[in-house]
Image (tube, rainbow, N blue to C red):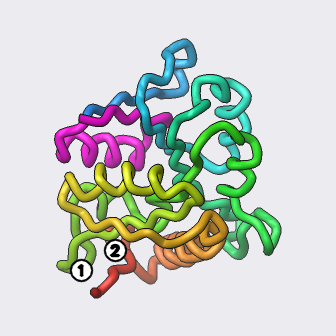
Amino acid sequence: MTKISIIGTGNMGKAIAELVVKGGNEAQLIGHADADTAVSGDIVVLAVPYSALSEVVADRATQLTGKVVADITNPVNFETFDSLTVPPDGSATSELAAALPESHVVKAFNTNFAATLASGQVGGLPTTVFIAGDNDDAKLILAQVVTAAGLNAVDAGSLARARELESIGFQQIALAASEKISWSAGFALVP
């Protein structure tokens, strides 16, 4: 059994916690009010907005040392929904990896909505979680947690691929915000 700490108790944090438990693993949910609660999982999922990443790093960098850290953020301009807020050659995840050099940072869950994680389906197909990172073991341990819950996990490549995953997440959010798709829709991967 793997223990996963999830920082963030919003829709995504709760959906990921349910997914973890469904797969027979243990979830620790840590909210903003739980500042004194130590991270205890081998995997730590940062289910917070992009703007909160620097605060999490400032408060918990030591606790994240040596752990797999999954960044689910999409650095979207939420006022206009017209762009990502990171440089064109960067990503939120690459910034996080630079701030946490002793952690194994991966990008995951950012192309999923909470509803598709909870239901395990997108358009009648199993929900697919893309995972990008530079540490193959880190990607594998997270993929095992995802597949244990009945979802598909796909290795999306190196950490450099986080930029493309953030673009996909941005497009999906923009479509839902403009009511072109529902918040329970999403992209499906057909093998």
List the residue tagged with mark 2: 185
**Whole-percent x and y of residue 12?**
41, 49
Instruction: Check disc 2 and give the amino acid type.
Output: Ala
Magenta stretch contains residue 119: no
Instruction: Check disc 1 and give the amino acid type.
Output: Gly
Q: Check residue 123 in the rendering and tell me which mark sits there, or answer none.
A: 1
Indicate the quadrant where residue 29 lies.
top left
**Whole-percent x and y of residue 61?**
67, 29
Region of the chain picked out in magenta, as a range: 1-25
For residue 149, side relative to residue 161 (left or right): left
Tell me the residue at 76%/66% (across/down). 90
Residue nearest the observer in this picture, 78 or 15: 15
Tell me the residue at 72%/73% (across/down). 83
**Whole-percent x and y of residue 132?**
53, 64
Tell me the residue at 57%/33% (across/down). 66
Labels 1 & 2 near each other (Cβ < 8 A): yes
